Amino acid sequence: MSKANLIDPFGRQVEYLRLSVTDRCDLRCAYCIPEGFKGFEEPADWLSFDEIERVIRLFAQMGLKRVRLTGGEPLLRRNITDLTRRLAALPGIEDLSLSTNATQLARHAPALKASGITRLNVSLDSLDPQQMIRIAGRDALANILAGLETARQTGFAPIKINMVVMQENVDAIDGMVDYCMERGFVLRLIELMPMGETARRLGYVDLQPIKARLQQNFSLIDTVMQGGGPARYLGTPDGHFNVGFITPMSQHFCATCNRVRLTVDGVLHLCLGQEDHIELRPLLRAGASDDDLVQALLDSIARKPERHEFREQPAKTIRFMNATGG
């Protein structure tokens, strides 16, 4: 199959899939899971490892190169390293990474590395225990920091720290910079997207002034880092520290969007800020042939929209990140 099959109507080649393996999480970050949310998928509706492997194999035959496992919290999915081992072995998959909140990472890091996970992104929004309780809904900071240290000792590098910036934690950025500098972690600051009323209430913070301040204070220069995501990076001239900025609101990156998202129940989302999607689970469980599935994937890529409309229509899309995948 030609890799050109995964080129969307706007000339973008889709080569990156965010794969949600569960919508469950042991934290309750308000921008991800609203308070009182109980609408989790039943495990019987989750794609099985065989179903996931089949979809990724077909995608890879058409040019998919990168897969990132997400959730919810992917380390809550039982026997997750069985899946990562299978995906790492698929021809065409060049980069297999994982996003985690790191609460379970201390006991999983060695097995993840052995199974083929090459890179880790860890969600961490503050180093202040009380602030983390307010943001994440439980006291998990000690477990997260222990997980990060185990991952570092296991040999994962680079480890990227994802910090969603909002009014609650904007004062914690400088402390996070110091923490990442000391340990050789990459810091990535992320603008809050207005996905649901709960997220909008948390308070959007424009990262452009913060980017300018950090660039001046630390004499940072433009740099590039490995990965298929949308971050724009600055770094110290000696390469010791890098900070990325993911700015879907103040400086969107839709023109270079190369990714789609597959939920745990088999829904392929083509854009976070639009409703275009295709349901793969009914096809998988109705005996669809590989050709049928390939055609469904091609049809979906042909419907990938040009861009989100978070600024123009902030209430248009109501979707919870634990269900969609990070």
Image (cartoon, rainbow, N blue to C red):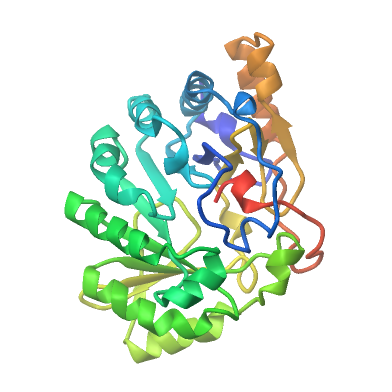
Q: How many marks?
A: 0
Please give the name of the residue rendered at 24% of the width and 68% of the height, measured from the top-left corner: 184
Please give the name of the residue rendered at 43% of the width and 51% of the height, measured from the top-left corner: 100
Q: Quadrant of residue 7?
A: top right
Please give the name of the residue rendered at 24% of the width and 60% of the height, measured from the top-left corner: 149
263 lies above or below 289: below
Residue 190 appears in view: no
Is 217 placed left or right of 54 in the picture?
left
Q: Nearer the viewer, residue 174 or 67?
A: 174
Residue 41 appears in view: yes
Q: Quadrant of residue 45?
A: top right
Is 273 placed left or right of 263 in the picture?
right
Which residue sits furthest front? 139
Estimate the x, y position of residue 262 in percent, counting from the top left: 59, 37
34 lies above or below 71: below
Estimate the x, y position of residue 288 in percent, counting from the top left: 65, 11
Q: Nearer the viewer, residue 80 or 155?
A: 80
Estimate the x, y position of residue 168 in percent, counting from the top left: 57, 79
Is 82 placed left or right of 53 in the picture?
left
Q: Quadrant of residue 275?
A: top right
Estimate the x, y position of residue 199 in percent, counting from the top left: 68, 66
